[in-house]
Amino acid sequence: MSLSRRYFLQATAAAAAGSRAFKRHQLRADDTVQSKSANDKLGVAMIGTGGRGAEHLSQIAGRVDAEVLYLCDPDLSQAASKAQAVEMRQGRAPKLEEDFRKALEDPNVDVISTATPNHWHSLVSILAMQAGKHVYVEKPVSHNVWEGRQMVGWARELNKICQCGTQSRSSPALIEAVNYVQEGKLGKIQYAIGTCYKPRKSIGKLDKPLEFPASFNYDLWCGPAAKVDIYRPKLHYDWHWDFNTGNGDMGNQGIHQMDIARWFLGEQSLSPRVMSIGGRLGYEDAGNTPNTQIVYHAYEKAPLIFETRGLPKKELNYGTGMDSYRGSTVGVIIQCENGYVVVPSYVEATAFSPDGEKIESWKTEGDATKRHFDNFFDAVRSGKHTDLTGDILEGHISSALCHTGAISHLLGEHQSAEEIEKQVSTDPLWADSWKRMAEHLQANGVDLNDPKLLVGPWLEMDPAQERFITNDPANKMLTRDYRPGYVVPAASPQQARVGTSPAVRG
């Protein structure tokens, strides 16, 4: 089950030379040894031990069927801070490793659970699967569209279980609500709106680069991303608001609601057309991802609009001042011919008549994340990816919808409110979404006559190939410039669609 000796000799030699880089290899893992008997514990390596990593550990440590063997983090102080709690829960302390390759080398590791920053999700997962391990990977599963598709390809090629951390997929209540809508109980779906109205304060801005302690391996932390100076006061978590390492709140919190919306719609591919309107407004800081954005995915059967808002209402605080749309703050609205459904959380949903009368409701008691991890470990035991509720394919498509919306944004041009209104006026749904966002910005003191909003182009896509049609600038953004030694390896064409090859930064 371990990676080939040849690969590790290469990797060890590279590390000794000071490169701290991964060597791409063509070898495949030995899959002759599969999951252990039900009486044996599965060995787990936790990669990335920050906020979400701590949640993973709370779900895994102490399970009767699993044991955390490793905590891996380029910030060893962060890993060490979690070790005692893990030992108390399971009775044995995990090993601490700065470089997760050490854990991949251990044949006692059956599973990796990863909650690294987004830019590492794909490469960690693929290397783990090549090492014969099964993978639980946080959302979004990828930093860009291309590498997410390669994750799907490697999971299928190596017959590995790869679960995306979209825990709503394991909620019985949401499963019932989706079935209710898809069975036509409310008639034809007309549209879906996902909302991520979540307060995000300024992350600040330094006038000189952030300094790191000598014990922190910043080169390894950067991995596939550009190794650049950081001008924000805090490295951890605030990487979400830098496109070099994160995907903004649409790709952080909003990926959950994007996934739920797509699930209700029953769409199994990327949208054929996408457009974004948004910006980072209300303050100036070191972030570059939008804190206010609307993205329109023009699916043929019914459109999916996604709305991100990070500012509170004016003169209200960040804890109590957020908007709500039809009962949804961080949630989803599914509008149908004969009513609508509001999904305000991972574990509940309510169906309403057209006049707002409650028709049906569903609610799951208990911990949605625990159910999702239970589902993952059950699938590892069965060896069937079809047993997963959040299979990597589902995670890839929903993550990629966030990425294509971001691409339209990044290709956008500044326009005034008047110019935007003209663009959206022909589509009542799009116009309404813009009107509500404009009111939100005005309530927060943002002058819409000052053209600060970026209006992206309509991007046409071939969903079967996951490439934009006759748009080279947009297609270049389907992947990224990878640093040498950290290139995401391509899966075989039989398992992954042929798309843009990754670039390597010299």
Image (cartoon, grey):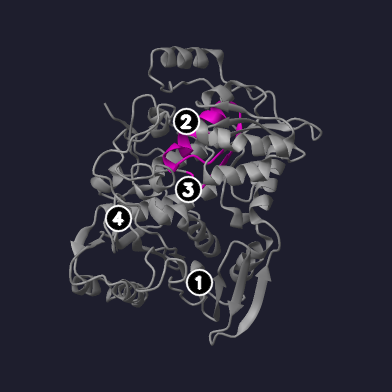
Label 3 – label 2 distance at C-alpha: 21 Å
Picture layout, residue 52 above or below residue 433: above
In the rendered image, which quarter is residue 113 located in?
top right
Decide: marks 4, 2 in contact (CB < 8 A)?
Answer: no
Give the mark nearer the N terminus: 3 vs 2: 2
Considering the image in quadrants, where does the C terminus appear? Answer: top left
Q: Which residue is mark 4?
A: 408
Q: Which residue is mark 2?
A: 74
Give the mark nearer the N terminus: 3 vs 4: 3
**Neighbours of disc 2 within 10 Å: few (<14), some (14-19), many (20+):** many
Picture layout, residue 406 above or below residue 378: below
**Neighbours of disc 3 within 10 Å: few (<14), some (14-19), many (20+):** many
Q: In front of the other: label 3 or label 2? A: 2
Q: Which residue is mark 1?
A: 328
Q: Which residue is mark 3?
A: 140
Q: In this picture, which residue range is highlighted in magenta?
A: 114-141
Q: In front of the other: label 3 or label 4? A: 3
Looking at the rendered structure, the kind of residue marked 1 is Ser
